[in-house]
Image: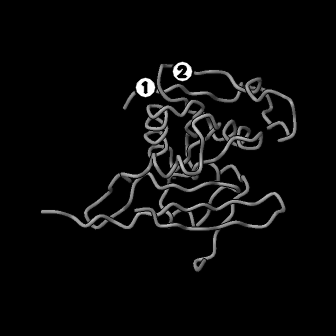
Amino acid sequence: MTRAAPDRFIHVANTSEDGKDVDRTSRVDQPRNKTIACKPGSGFSAPPADSSQDIRQYMAPIRSSESAVTVDVHAAKGFVDSGHKYLDVRTVEEFKKGHPWNALNVPYVFFTPQGREKNPEFLEQVSLICDKHDHIVVGCQSGVRSLQATEELLKAGFEHVKNMGGGYVAWVENGFLVKALQEEL
């Protein structure tokens, strides 16, 4: 029995330099991890985006291995505020309900009537919007899909990729700024 492949899209939502929203959708035919968290008592606050401060001074490794790096939501926000790209790997439908400002969206899986199906064009789609040398924080709803996506990106040669532990749920719970797209684009 063959299943019909779901439509595959690459969705980019961002804010341009002049503050105007840019939003377009285009059709396109478990290892251990390393965790980084804020230093206890550091009073973490992200340095300004134009700051020359090194964000690493705010964090301390908790667990390490040769695989993905997972950062807590405060560290992830600090990285994004200092210029890292935020790659949201949730579905387009999840993304439209809300996402961090300036997030890029490439679904890692699709929800189909048959269940979850991995996006077979994930790496190709990410390569269209991110360079292998870009600094990227990967997030999803809770941190599971983003860890898988981070591992895949690292194996594909992306050099500076971090998983955001807790995902979008943690982002919202911490009161960080989010943006919701209109249902009709």
Three-letter amino acid code of the residue under disc 1: Arg
Q: Where is residue 66 in the image (x, y as percent from the top left)?
A: 47, 20
In the drawing, does residue 131 fall left or right of residue 57? left
Query: Secondary structure under badge 1?
Result: loop
Q: Position of residue 94 (x, y in %)?
A: 51, 63
Question: Which quadrant holds the N terminus?
Answer: bottom left
Q: Residue at 75% of width from left, 41% of height from top?
A: 83
Pick the residue in front: 25 or 149: 25
Name the residue that disc number 1 marks: 32
Q: Residue at 47% of width from left, 67% of height from top?
A: 27
In the drawing, does residue 1 fall left or right of residue 25? left
Q: Are marks 2 and 1 in contact (CB under 8 Å)?
A: yes
Q: Which mark is residue 90?
A: none
Q: Residue at 84% of width from left, 62% of height from top?
A: 18
Are there few (<14), some (14-19), or many (20+) residues within 10 Å of tag 1? few
Name the residue that disc number 2 marks: 63
Relative to 183, say whether 100 is above or below.
Answer: above
Pick the residue in front: 3 or 74: 3
Q: Position of residue 120 (x, y in %)?
A: 36, 51
Q: Distance between the residues labelled 2 and 1?
A: 9 Å
Q: State which quadrant residue 17 falls in.
A: bottom right
Are there few (<14), some (14-19), or many (20+) residues within 10 Å of tag 2? few
In the drawing, does residue 164 fall left or right of residue 58? left
Q: Position of residue 175 (x, y in %)?
A: 71, 53
